[in-house]
Image (spheres, rainbow, N blue to C red):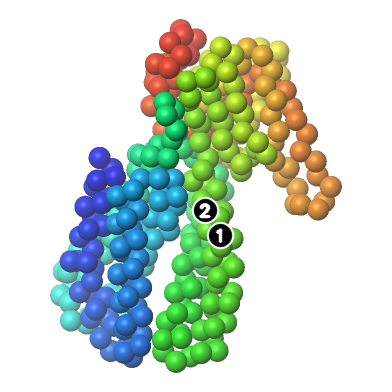
């Protein structure tokens, strides 16, 4: 349902947001009008394709595109009244904001990451680190989208030197930040017929694969995480995510190779650690627990 609600809102943007943007562009140079209009239609079309083809890569691309709607609407509103009625501008800005909010939900994301799943497997997105939510992600998006767009508009207005400079800086920045954002989209807890996989290259150098018969339990983590059966603390793979975490208990030690926190080149070595429990933070812990209970069908795999 979340996917189709966001799709409906996205399809409404040319009707509600385009008049406000056209009015704001009416006083600009012809080159700026053409480049801005072509860029906005291209972004909208790519967004439609992403919504129709739910894949993990589509989720990353759409989540990069969709905040451009509120940004463009706000810029159009600040540019002046233009030719659009204030009510039309407000409606377009509201619809664009709702689409961006819907695309950021866990319900929307789960549809897309499972569109890339293989056979009988179920993926659950992991929540991003809390330290990235307010500030770093927004600044990364502003650089990822703002530098190329600003460079293209400067070139269209005839400002060749600053436009080329922004594009020269923006291209490698977009590649680096785009890969980083896609990495956040590719963090999953995966239930496969043979067992459980923790796929998260933010915290791990390699995925954790545990056979079904070795999974003793999947349960909500306590405020003070409970010890594993051998008395050792569970390995924390939540990356500092806020909210409820889940603890996976194993019957046999599982090797975990955490990604070194130190910068490359400092001599930090990723050493494997054998553990009987790990902590993960799915975006939807309730459905994750219910699916685990149905997949394992064991009394010690808790069903909330």
Q: Which mark is residue 299?
A: none
> Observer-nearest residue: 41 or 102?
41
Which residue does the numbered mark 1 point to in the structure image?
177
How many residues crowd around disc 2 within 10 Å: few (fewer than 14), some, or many (20 or more)? some
CA–CA distance in space, label 2 to label 1? 6 Å
Look at the image and tell me in which quarter the C terminus lies. Answer: top left
Q: Which mark is residue 181?
A: 2
- Of all residues, the one furthest to the top in this rendering is 299
Labelled pair 2, 1 in contact (Cβ < 8 Å): yes
Res. 242 visible in picture: no
Q: Is residue 237 above or below residue 298?
A: below
Residue at left offset 75%, top offset 30%: 272
Look at the image and tell me in which quarter the N terminus lies. Answer: top left
> Observer-nearest residue: 270 or 303?
270
Q: SS for tag 1?
A: helix
Q: For residue 107, which quarter of the picture? A: top left
Q: SS for tag 2?
A: helix
């Amino acid at each position: 349902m979340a996917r189709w609600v966001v799709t409906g809102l996205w399809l409404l943007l040319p009707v509600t947001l385009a008049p406000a943007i056209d009015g704001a562009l009416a006083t600009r140079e012809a080159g700026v009008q053409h480049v801005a209009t072509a860029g906005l239609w291209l972004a909208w079309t790519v967004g439609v394709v992403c919504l129709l083809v739910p894949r993990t890569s589509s989720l990353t691309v759409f989540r990069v595109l969709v905040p451009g709607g509120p940004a463009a609407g706000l810029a159009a509103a600040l540019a002046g009244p233009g030719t659009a009625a204030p009510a039309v501008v407000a409606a377009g800005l509201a619809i664009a904001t709702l689409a961006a909010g819907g695309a950021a939900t866990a319900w929307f994301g789960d549809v897309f990451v499972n569109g890339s799943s293989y056979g009988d497997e179920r993926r659950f997105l992991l929540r991003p680190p809390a330290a990235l939510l307010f500030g770093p992600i927004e600044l990364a998006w502003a650089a990822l989208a703002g530098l190329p767009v600003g460079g293209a508009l400067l070139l269209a207005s005839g400002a060749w030197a600053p436009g080329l400079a922004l594009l020269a800086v923006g291209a490698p920045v977009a590649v680096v930040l785009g890969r980083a954002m896609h990495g956040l989209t590719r963090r999953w807890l995966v239930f496969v017929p043979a067992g459980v996989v923790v796929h998260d290259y933010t915290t791990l150098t390699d995925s954790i694969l545990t056979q079904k018969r070795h999974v003793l339990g999947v349960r909500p983590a306590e405020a003070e995480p409970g010890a594993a059966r051998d008395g050792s603390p569970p390995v924390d793979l939540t990356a500092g995510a806020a909210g409820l975490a889940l603890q996976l208990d194993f019957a046999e030690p599982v090797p975990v190779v955490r990604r070194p926190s130190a910068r490359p080149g400092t001599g930090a070595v990723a050493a494997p650690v054998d553990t009987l429990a790990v902590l993960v933070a799915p975006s939807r812990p309730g459905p994750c627990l219910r699916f685990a209970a149905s997949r394992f069908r064991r009394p010690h795999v808790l069903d909330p």
